[in-house]
Image (cartoon, grey):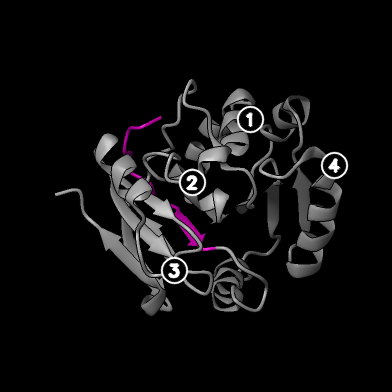
Amino acid sequence: MGTILKMNGLILLSGGGDSKQSNRIDEYLRNTIIPVDSSRCLYIPLALKNDFYLDGLRWFTDQYNYLNQVDMVTNKSEALNYMKNSYDLIYIGGGNTGKLLYEITLYHLDQFILDHIKSGGVVYGGSAGAIIFGKTITVAPKDEFESTKDNHGLNLLGNNSIVPHFNGTFSQHHIKEAKKYNSGLIGISESSGLVFRDGEVIKKINSRGIDQFTKN
């Protein structure tokens, strides 16, 4: 992780929030996916506590009922099985950022996600699912990562790190971690979203809720 690669696919990021707040981002996602004849999705709820996976799946299939096929990965065995398939969409939800990144790495889903984007696929990351695409996950709340582990994100966002649930101000914690990792910051409010291709922002959804801090 940490290397910026040429990517043909799209990375959609939302700042979190409820279905009403993310409506415009979800509409963009649907308009991107719906032309596909058979919309296949890999749903990754690993940021949630294990006991909430099925609740997450019920919410997801209700919210995105236009998808033809949804596979949910919850452990390494399932990951190995589903990585034999191809998908139009990989959806990564919110929760505990460290748990999400560590398990994605443990199950080797990180490389699968990279290959998916390189081949032109679409990835959606919400809240914690957005943070892992940045340069570091240490911009997340301190109880969501461990200092003894590798906290580098996938770094597919032009050397920026993501602050979801953005309220208009970067905290001293955010700025400290950005400088430590030589990273910029992008804040995304709960009603905003960003679309990236090849590490560059190609669309802002509700730009009033988005701000940026550059390390220089």
Q: CA distance from mark 2 to mark 1?
A: 16 Å
Q: Quadrant of the N terminus?
A: top left
Q: Please say if 130 is above or below 188.
A: above
Q: CA distance from mark 3 to mark 1?
A: 29 Å
Q: Which amino acid type corresponds to the residue marked 3 in the rendered image?
A: Asn
For the view shown, which residue lies furthest in the left direction? Answer: 216
Task: Locate residue 187: give its quadrant.
Answer: bottom left
Tags 3 and 1 in contact by the CB under 8 Å rule? no
Q: Is residue 14 magenta?
A: yes
Image coords of residue 215 (percent x, y)? 20, 48
Image coords of residue 204 (percent x, y)? 38, 72
Q: Which amino acid type corresponds to the residue marked 2 in the rendered image?
A: Ala
Q: Is residue 174 visible?
A: yes
Q: CA distance from mark 4 to mark 2?
A: 22 Å
Instruction: Assess disc 3: are there few (<14), some (14-19) or many (≥20) residues with their C-alpha within 10 Å of its C-alpha.
Output: some
Which label was assigned to residue 140?
2
Q: Is residue 175 magenta?
A: no
Q: CA distance from mark 3 to mark 4?
A: 30 Å
199 lies left or right of 113:
left
Which label was assigned to residue 51?
4
Residue under numbered circle 3? 167
Q: Nearer the viewer, residue 107 or 17?
A: 17
Q: Please say if 63 is above or below 7.
A: below
- The span shown in magenta is 1-15
Q: Please say if 104 is above or below 130.
A: above
Q: Nearer the viewer, mark 4 or mark 2?
A: 2
